[in-house]
Structure formats: C-alpha cells, structure tokens
Image (spheres, grey):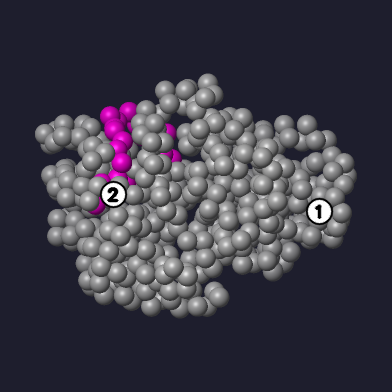
Amino acid sequence: MKHSIRRRLVAAVALAAASAVALSGCGSSGSSTLDVDAPVTITWWTGQPEDSHRLLVALAEEFEAEHPNVTIDIAPGAPTTDDLLQKILAGFVGGSYPDISYAYGSWAGELAASGRMQDISERIADPAVKWDEFPTSGRETVQPEDAVIGFPALIDNLSLLYNKTLFDEAGLEYPTNDWTWDDFREAAAALTDASTQTFGTAYPVSGTEDTTWRFWPMLWQNGGEILSADGATAAFDSPAGVAGLEVWREMAVEDGSVYLDQTGEKFEQLFVSGRIGLLIDGPWLFYDVIESGIDYGVAFLPGTDGDHATISGPDIWALFDHDDANRAYWSAELIQWITSAEQDARYSLALGNLPLRPEAEERMPEFQEFLATYPGVEDVVANFENVTRSRPTVQGYTGVSEAVADAIVGVLQGQGTSAEALAEAAEAADQALAKAR
C-alpha cells in the first residue's frame, strides 16, 4: 500500500540508472528449457527510496555471490512507487518490462490481466516455500483469480495511533481496543483547537487508493461489501456504505475536527509534529514518530457493534514472464530467498516494516530488537486478528477505487450527500468493471 516513506523521491542518479536498466536485457528471446547453470541476467525494479533500496542491493549481491551464474540488474525503476505502474504498462508495449518489480497490491488484477505475468502456483505448493507463513491477506493479494503472480513484499494494517500528550492536555482518557466510532468522534472534537491549529484527526483526500482503502473497514464493520459476490458490480453503495461515510462527513463538515489533506503528503507529518491527536494509519509511520520524540500509543480501529475489522494493504513482488525458462526460474528463486524468514528479518524489520512471516520471525532475535526499537508495533501485529477480508483483486479494481475516492473527496469537502455520492460512484465503478471484462 502507498506509504509516505515509499513516496520520497529517489536520487536523480538512481533514476538515470533505472532508465538504462529498463532498456537492457528485457526484450531478448529466451530459452524454452531450464538450465540452472546457464548464465542469466534478471532485471529487478525495487520501487524503493534510497535507504531500503540500498539494503536490497546488498542482498542482491549476496545472492549473486552464492549463484555466480546469475547477474541482477537492480534499480528503483521510477522516481516513486506510484510511477511504477505506468512504467510497467509502457514497458509491455515496448518490451522493456522487468523480471521483477515492486507493485501495490491494488494493481494485482490489472497486472494479471496483462498476460505478461508468471504463474508460480506449482512453486508455492512445495512445502519448502512455507507459503502458509505469509498472512492470508498477503497470499490472497498475489493470487488474482487462479494465478499466483508473485510473492508478498510488504504487509501492514490500519491501526489507531494517538498522541498521549494531546490527550493529557485535553483531560481525555486514552483510546482502547474497545472504542466505538462515537468515542472516536467525541475525542476528535475535544482535541480540535482552532487557536493552535490542532485537529482531532485527519483524512487524505488526494483521490487515490490512499483515500479509498481507509473507507473499506467502516463498510465491512457495518455489514457491507465492496463488490457483488461475482465481482461484476459495485455493492458499496449500500446502507452500510452510507453509514460509514456519514461518520466522516459529520466529523469533517459539521464538527470541523478533520484535517483534509488534498496532497496526501502532509497529514502524517502533522501528526508527527504534534498537531493531530488521532490518526488511522500504519506501521510505516513508526520510524518518523519515534524520531520526533512524541509520546504516542496504538489501539485497534474503533468498532461498530464490537466489530473492529481493519484492512491490510499488502504490496507484492510481481514476477514477469519473458518466455525464458532461466529468467523465470531465477527471478522466482531470488524473491523466494528475499522473502524467506531469515532474509526478511534482515530487511523488513531493519526498516521498521512488519515481518512478512510473523509467526516464524517472532522467534528470532531480530524481532525482539524490532519490538524494543518500535514501541506499539506489537499492537499492530495483534491487530491482524481484525484483518478478516481483503480488497478485491479483480480486473477493474483501479477504476472502482478511483470512483470511490472521488465520492469520499466530495462528501468530506461538503459537496453532496453520502448516499448520492456513493450511488454515482457505483455507476462509474460498474462501468470500469464492465470495461475490464
């Protein structure tokens, strides 16, 4: 999922290297039979900023040392992760797409429909892969329809972060895992102070998936669904959807307790700087929060009738097919190795990300160090018990997301009613789904 740390600009030198890599080694004819000892070059677009990209480069060099016949051309691939999809789609046309690329989970359906992906279903059936160690949300995201198009690259979930200092100053009790949305709304109103430009909470109204996915938990908590059972039509324009969106409309329009971030880039840093009391966000923010020194806590999302359903936004290592058995084999081998518990403990935990294989990694010393470094992360891990559903990976989901995001943006800015906006979004979503079929 889109996270602030992944949206930082990559250095211009890295981008130039990515452009050079994009044009090399991607369009050649390949071997139809596997020869694991044959020299092979694979291209890897990491989609990462400098700190995490540097770690992956070091791991790639280790892999090359263990497998001297393998050369890994590794580069960020684009200025930001958001730019990777267009780069990949353009590469499909020109034959310059990579063997491996980071991808947001919300792109999975579109990538699967391209006909350019590997299907590693047979590989993951091997007990040695330990596929069941990945959380269900991660496994489901890389398996749109019947194909498994890669490995999970990142897992997370939305939790409730709060500023203890602001709560103390307002004389409020801290949030608990039993909070309701009424509790959330009342606290947000009490924490809002126009004189100090302090807001109770915030919502990104950038019109992207970052806007949309924050709405899905409230839909689910109210008993709603995103799509029909066959995935062919929208179902979010229901009383459940309207009830969920109304909570945010009332807070934003009537209470004035919501900072509406049109860029999607500012709201997290306002929380880090002590100007927002409550934030529905994920573990990617912990590094900045800890660096800032603010006193914070973590709880489950507020619930409806005891249902505290949240959402995980797994990202993926997408594996592409170039009709070359050797490239396909070694690209999958590399990512299987990178996402093993041993390597992930050195990569994800070092960056403050949640472990890809929580039950396996929690026994490792790196995990104990991780918990000590990032207080509250254990609450986010515990919050996986509330991840009971996944976003659809159907073709056309990106169109659904855009339609819902537009509806949320309008309603939270006082334009129209929740029912009207969601009904209009459903019509646009249905068109996107029909066009994708």
Tell me where residue 80 appears, x and y as whole percent. Answer: 54, 51
47 is higher (above) or lower (below) than 248: above
Say which amino acid is labelled 2: Asp
- The amino acid pointed to by label 1 is Ala
Is 112 drawn above or below residue 368 in the view shown? Answer: below
* Quadrant showing the C terminus: bottom right
Q: What residue is at 37 percent from the left and 28 percent from the top?
A: 375
Q: Residue at x 50, y 58 (%)?
A: 106
**What is the spatial separation of the Cα atoms under label 2 and label 1, in whole angstroms?**
47 Å
Q: Nearer the viewer, mark 2 or mark 1?
A: 2
Asked if residue 234 lies left or right of residue 359, the reply is left
Q: Is residue 297 left or right of residue 436?
A: left
Instruction: State which quadrant residue 59 falls in.
Output: top right
Residue 377 visible in the shown view: yes
Q: Position of residue 309 (x, y in %)?
A: 34, 49
Residue placed most toward the observer, 381 or 99: 381
Q: Which one is nearer the viewer's eye here, 263 or 286?
A: 286
Residue highlighted by disc 2? 307
Residue 308's place in the image compared with 109, above or below, is: above
Which residues make up the magenta segment? 280-304
Task: Look at mark 1 in the image and give the residue it sits on.
Answer: 325
Give yes or no for residue 120 being in the magenta stretch.
no
Q: Earlier in the sequence, mark 2 or mark 1?
A: 2
Residue in the image at 66% along x and 47% along y: 124
Residue 39 pos. (x, y %): 86, 44
State which quadrant residue 261 falls in.
bottom left
With 164 as the anchor, is 135 left or right in this view?
Answer: right
Image label count: 2
Check residue 300 for magenta coloring: yes
Q: Quadrant of residue 117?
A: bottom right
Q: Are marks 2 and 1 in contact (CB under 8 Å)?
A: no
Q: Is residue 402 visible?
A: no
